[in-house]
Image (tube, helix red, strand yellow):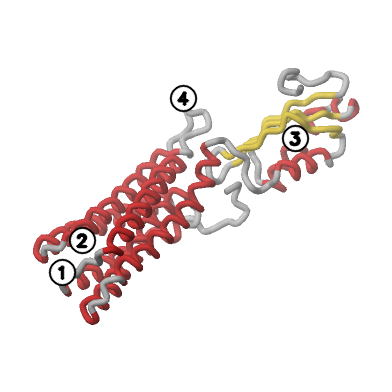
Amino acid sequence: MPHDHHHHHRIDPDAGDRRVIWAVAVNMLLTVAQVAAGLVSGSLALIADAVHNFSDAISLVIALAARRIARRPRDDSMTFGYGRAEIVAALINYTTLIAIGLYLFAEAAFRMADPPGVEGWLVVIVAGFAFVVDAVTALLTFRMAKDSVNIRAAFLHNVADAMGSVAVIVAGSLILLYDWRLIDPLVTIGIAVYILWHAGREIGPVIRILMMGSPDVPALQQLADRIRAEEGVEDVHHLHLWQIDEHRTSLEAHVVLTETAASDFSVKLSEVKAMLARDFGITHATLEIETAASGCADAVACR
């Protein structure tokens, strides 16, 4: 997730916040409705699903809080700013998704031995209502999810829930009509695998950012070769590339100039920085200028 070459039409931050607030509201409404229906029908499954939907609302609250924190200006204690708040929120939400996926898998495996019955059509009807709410929530956050790993994690929570609701409708109908009880755990296993696959794929880049890993693009060697190709540059070393957040990449390097280029190093420094911004979208670059005669400014790091 390096700098963004593709300029999506991003939603205004305040408008985005309002969408997330609406998504939280509809999920809380669904939770209350499911608890009430679960108590009336005596369905423990519906109450359990209500708890799951409540976790969706919490994931959206975490995402919203992170969005607001991320927009705070940098200060003396956070000199890079607060952008990584969204990365931390994504890590929390993906971790809970993985936990939910493992729980569903284990629960489905347990139910394979003794598939349960269904409490009645009320369960299927409420599942239909739950699907509508999850679909609305997903639509509210869909566009925002394209540009934010934080919102993408919360979005995936709701997509997983929507799939769960479809599974309840399909499996519940088949059980009520044909008493095919095995379909419920089989569909649940499918959903669990889907959740684990998506969450496992998305959590890797999140951890990579928090570990100050370099982005996939540009490759470090490609970047080094491009800097060396600049006129007046003899070599580059002590090269570090990391992501400040999902959309900003930072670079640090020692650039060795020819004696001629070094005589007016400020011009060459500006040229290299302009190239990094133009070709790679890297606008935060710290470059140490050296010459062959001066040697490396950091002897320990350059060994």
Q: What kind of element bears circle 2?
A: helix
Q: Position of residue 284 (x, y in %)?
A: 63, 36
Callout 3 crowding tier (Cα within 10 Å): few <14, some 14–19, many ≥20:
few
For marks 1 and 2 on the same chain, the one whose residue lies earlier in the sequence: 2
User: Could you say which is closer to the camera, residue 21 or residue 264?
Assistant: 21
Residue type, mark 4 in image: Ser
Q: What kind of element bears circle 4?
A: loop
The span from disc 1 to disc 2 (Cα, nearest Å) is 9 Å
The span from disc 4 to disc 2 (Cα, nearest Å) is 47 Å
Q: Nearest to the eye among marks 3 and 2: give it.
A: 2
Give above or below for 195 relative to 227.
Answer: below
Mark identifier at residue 45? 2
Q: Nearest to the eye among marks 3 and 4: give it.
A: 4
For marks 1 and 3 on the same chain, the one whose residue lies earlier in the sequence: 1
- Work out which residue is located at the far bottom of the displayed protein and give it: 177
Which quarter of the figure has residue 292? top right
Q: Are marks 1 and 2 in contact (CB under 8 Å)?
A: yes
